[in-house]
Image (spheres, grey):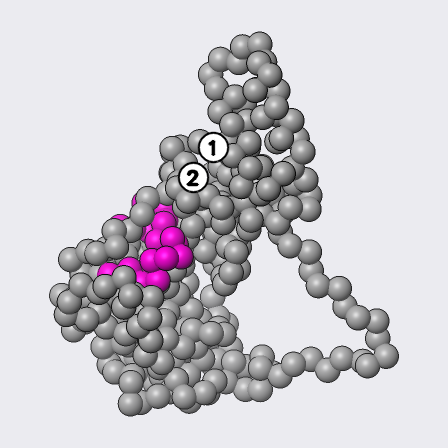
Amino acid sequence: MQFSGILASLFAAALFMFSPVALAQSAQDQAALAALAAVDIKHTPAKKLFGAAKLPTNLAARAIGGYAKGCLSGAKALPVNGPTWQVMRTSRNRNWAHPALLNLIEKLANDARKDDGWNGLLVGDMSQPRGGPMLTGHASHQIGLDADVWFTPMPDHVLTDKERESLVPIDMVKDRSTLNRDTWTESHAKLIKTAASYPEVARIFVHPPIKKELCRWATGDRSWLAKVRPYFNHTYHFHIRMKCPQGFAGCKNQAPAAPADGTGCGTELAYWMGPIPWTPKKRDPNAKPVKPAPALTLAGLPAECRAVVTAP
C-alpha cells in the first residue's frame, strides 16, 4: 500500500477508534483497523507520518513530550502576514505552533518595533501542523515551542511568494569564530536581549561569535545571558525555545541547568570558540563501520502521539 493510502487508512481508523460510541464493526471499520495494525510502528520513520499531515488536529492545544521527541495537538498557524512580522519559506508549511508560542512571537515582534529599532521580524521554521519529526532539517521543533527568527529585518513591503522562498538571509558571522561587523548591529543585540528577558523563554541559540559579542556588549543586569547558548548553524537566525506552558502534564521542559559562571561567557563560550566542537573525531581505520542510528519511529514517541498523527 502506498504511504498516502496508509495515512488515509490511519485517519479512518482513528475516526472509529476514538468515536464516543463504538458499534459493531462494519467491513470498512475492520479494514481501517487492519491497516492501522499493519503499520510497523517500530520501523516506519515517524517523520513520514508527521510530514504527511498537512493540517492540525481538532484537539485541545498540547505540547506532548520533549523538544526533540514529541508531537503537537491543537496547533495554530502564525498568519503569514502580520502587522510586525512576515513568515518565510511558506512552502515548508512549518508556521504552526502551540498558541502560547504564537503569542510570544507577536509580543516580540511588537516590542522589537517599539523598543529595538526593527521594522518587523521575518519568522522562519516553527513546527509542522502536528509537530513531530520533520522530513528534513531540525531535530527539535517537534512540540510547537521552538521558532527561528531571522536576523534580516523585515522589508517595507509585503513579500511575494517567490521572495519568501528565494530571499537570501543576511549572515552575521564570517566563520565559526568571527563576527561579521559589516552586518551585525546593536539592534540585533537588543532584539536578542528582549527575547531572552521574557520569563517564558527557556533558551536562545546563536552561533558562538554572536554569543561572544553579546557578552562584550551587555552591561548592568547580565543574567539574561544565561539563556543565550552557542550552538552550530545559527549564523543567520536565532532560535527561541519556550518553556512548557503551565498546567500541562506530559510536556518536558528544557533542562534548567545554567552555566557555571551564571552567564555562559566563561568556560562554556571558550569551549565553543575553540576547535573541539568543530573537529571531526578520528576513526580507527581498522574498526568496523558504524551503523547509522535508526530513524525515530512512532513507537519511540510518547503514546499520545499515536492519537495525534491519526486524528481526523
- Amino acid type of the residue tagged 1 in the rendering: Ala
Which residue is located at x 47 percent, y 66 percent?
A: 258
Q: Nearer the viewer, residue 48 or 181?
A: 48
Q: Nearer the viewer, residue 56 or 62?
A: 56
Q: Quadrant of the C terminus?
A: top left
Which residue is located at x 54 percent, y 81 percent?
A: 271
Residue at which label 1 appears: 311
Residue 88 within the magenta-colored segment of the rendering: yes
Residue 256 within the magenta-colored segment of the rendering: no
- Residue 45's x, y, as percent? 62, 49
The secondary structure type at the circle numbered 2 is strand
Q: Which residues are magenta?
A: 86-103
**Front position among marks 1 and 2:** 1
Which picture quadrant has residue 126?
Answer: bottom left
- Amino acid type of the residue tagged 2 in the rendering: Ser
- Residue 100's x, y, as percent? 32, 47
The secondary structure type at the circle numbered 1 is loop
- Residue 178's x, y, as percent? 42, 89
Query: Mark 1 or mark 2, which has the lower sequence index?
Result: 2
Residue at which label 2 appears: 73
Q: Is residue 48 left or right of residue 202?
A: right
Which picture quadrant has residue 109?
Answer: bottom left
